[in-house]
Image (spheres, rainbow, N blue to C red):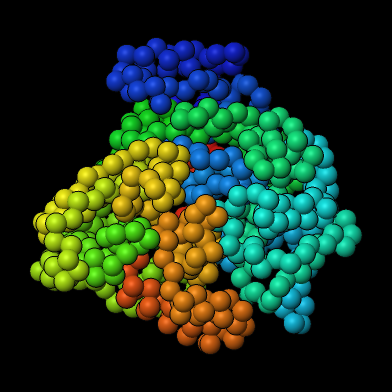
């Protein structure tokens, strides 16, 4: 149901339109799927007000996503979809525009010292958190100290280890002192991991310094509630410092099955869905009243081998698995041409990408390498999520089929995202290898490279392949400190070639972001770090 205002629509606790919707949905198969039954039916008459452009506004914007939230703590979340949800209520010091360029956020301007070791940010004045407390340099310092101080688990926190000390030099000026010059830190101040929460809220409503369960930020929407496995609800924060959004509320519906998300969109229960079935993209695009958006993304999809134990402690086995997979065929038949084969450990959209080559489909070579490694009768467990990536479960089954063709016995195990995220980090867990995706929020090479560094092995980070090469470690360490762009690019290219040869991953494909939505809604956009941008969505005029 489209909940933006319609001419003649009733108001009150429940409109006639809403009652008819409930009655109709109760008789359909869609209603039988409890994940799709909304707990409320908001009408435009409830809480109407005016947005920044003066247009009458209200109603609820319903978004269908495929994964449950693993954390409501910006420091502890592990995936872009969760970041996208949290971004409705939380803000960062800087932001990215649609071209991936840095623009002001809670900081209006910034500059680096001549030696590159001090980054000074000048903050917005007059900004309040959703609990009414003031945002200032002390609040920003609190948050940066929290993610860099080692007392909170920060899975995507490698970029902040460069921070030495943080100073609030006055109420609106923040100085970040670095251990060494780092040209990438500013970009990382734009990722959700560094989002600013109210210091006053950290000891309230179930929150602790170590774990935020009720996020209170400065954003245009205020967190209301989270029902695990079902939905997350926001309401508009009317004292927001910036442009006011149109919708008075936003609900994220958690629907793992892509077909069920599509059904919710077609019924009108959802206004937008993330990653609709790739098989139906063309049909959705041509359906009256619906529209699609295929946006660029920096996500690479891969299978991480547990290189810390047999058989994947042997690089020949890892190479063999890469040669065994017919990636082009899977992209054509399972992903319907929506992705492209990786040619490097980094997706081509990242600064620092260096094209290395390819592991061509060669089952004969795969068998030969397995024989040379003395691994001719392998039996492995392959983990994969459901609903997180495009056709993830189906792609995992296709990969397993190719491996069976070269003599490997494969058991595919799938589960929901929070359970999967915890399981894949356990070195004694059931998976010998597992499917994963990585999309650097900062659009920079170092954020991807942390997946190949020992410092980011679980439980500290998400480098679940547990791979480390001393030469790679040296190149990446030197590159992070190198201010000469040409020299840094060369160091990063050398590292990519070594990682590719070591094959800690089964290198698969680079994914795009696909959205489908009601065509009578405007303001559906994106940023190139695999995020949709719909805070200012509204009915098309």
Q: Residue at left 28%, top 42%?
A: 413
Q: Residue at left 63%, top 21%?
A: 46
Task: Classify residue 255 by image quadrant.
Answer: top left
Residue 374 located left or right of residue 535: left
**In the image, residue 88 above or below residue 194:** above
Q: Position of residue 424 (x, y in %)?
A: 40, 48
Residue 492 located left or right of residue 139: left
Q: Residue at left 35%, top 66%?
A: 504
On the question of residue 4 being in view, the answer is no
Q: Position of residue 36 (x, y in %)?
A: 40, 26
On the question of residue 93 being in view, the answer is yes
Q: Residue at left 70%, top 38%?
A: 208
**In the image, residue 415 above or below residue 527:** above
Which quadrant, please, contains the N terminus? top left
Q: Nearer the viewer, residue 458 or 24?
A: 458
Q: Position of residue 344 (x, y in %)?
A: 36, 72
Q: Nearer the viewer, residue 432 or 292?
A: 432
Give the tally of numbered discs: 0
Q: Nearer the viewer, residue 174 or 427?
A: 427
**In the image, residue 418 above or below residue 112:** above
Task: Classify residue 368 by image quadrant.
Answer: bottom left
Q: Position of residue 531 (x, y in %)?
A: 50, 52
């Amino acid at each position: 149901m489209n909940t933006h205002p319609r001419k003649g629509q009733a108001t009150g606790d429940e409109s006639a339109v809403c009652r008819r919707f409930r009655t109709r949905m109760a008789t359909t198969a869609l209603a039988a799927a409890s994940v799709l039954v909304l707990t409320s039916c908001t009408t435009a008459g409830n809480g109407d007000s005016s947005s920044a452009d003066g247009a009458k506004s209200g109603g609820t914007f319903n978004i269908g996503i495929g994964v449950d939230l693993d954390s409501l703590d910006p420091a502890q979340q592990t995936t872009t979809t969760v970041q996208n949800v949290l971004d409705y209520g939380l803000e960062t010091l800087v932001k990215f525009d649609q071209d991936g360029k840095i623009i002001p956020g809670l900081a209006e301007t910034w500059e680096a010292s001549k030696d590159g070791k001090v980054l000074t940010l000048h903050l917005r004045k007059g900004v309040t958190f959703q609990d009414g407390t003031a945002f200032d340099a002390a609040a920003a310092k609190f948050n940066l100290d929290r993610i860099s101080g080692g007392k909170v688990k920060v899975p995507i926190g490698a970029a902040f280890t460069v921070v030495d000390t943080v100073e609030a030099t006055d109420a609106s000026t923040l100085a970040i002192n670095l251990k060494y010059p780092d040209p990438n830190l500013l970009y990382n101040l734009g990722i959700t991991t560094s989002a600013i929460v109210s210091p006053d809220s950290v000891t309230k409503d179930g929150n602790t310094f170590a774990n935020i369960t009720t996020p209170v930020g400065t954003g245009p929407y205020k967190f209301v509630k989270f029902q695990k496995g079902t939905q997350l609800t926001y309401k508009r924060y009317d004292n927001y410092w910036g442009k006011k959004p149109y919708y008075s509320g936003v609900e994220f519906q958690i629907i793992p099955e892509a077909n069920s998300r599509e059904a919710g969109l077609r019924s009108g229960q959802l206004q937008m869905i993330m990653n609709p079935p790739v098989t139906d993209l063309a049909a959705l695009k041509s359906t009256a009243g619906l529209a699609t958006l295929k946006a660029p993304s920096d996500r690479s999809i891969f299978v991480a081998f547990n290189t810390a134990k047999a058989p994947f402690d042997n690089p020949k086995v890892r190479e063999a698995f890469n040669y065994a997979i017919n990636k082009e065929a899977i992209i054509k038949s399972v992903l319907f041409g929506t992705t492209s084969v990786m040619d490097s450990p980094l997706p081509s959209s990242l600064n620092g990408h260096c094209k290395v080559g390819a592991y061509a489909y060669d089952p004969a070579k795969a068998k030969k390498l397995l024989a040379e490694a003395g691994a001719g009768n392998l039996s492995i467990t392959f983990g994969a999520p459901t609903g997180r990536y495009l056709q993830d479960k189906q792609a995992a089954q296709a990969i397993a089929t190719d491996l069976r063709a070269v003599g490997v016995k494969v058991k595919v195990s799938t589960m929901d995202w929070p359970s999967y995220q915890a399981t894949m980090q356990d070195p004694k867990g059931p998976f010998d290898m597992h499917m994963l995706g990585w999309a650097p929020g900062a659009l920079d090479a170092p954020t991807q490279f942390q997946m190949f560094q020992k410092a980011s092995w679980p439980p500290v980070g998400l480098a679940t392949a547990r791979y480390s090469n001393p030469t790679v470690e040296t190149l990446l360490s030197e590159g992070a400190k190198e201010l000469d762009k040409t020299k840094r690019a060369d160091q990063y290219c050398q590292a990519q070639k070594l990682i590719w040869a070591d094959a800690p991953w089964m290198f698969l494909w680079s994914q795009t972001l696909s959205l489908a939505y009601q065509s009578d809604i405007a303001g559906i956009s994106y940023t190139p770090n695999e995020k949709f941008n719909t805070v200012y969505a509204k009915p098309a005029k």
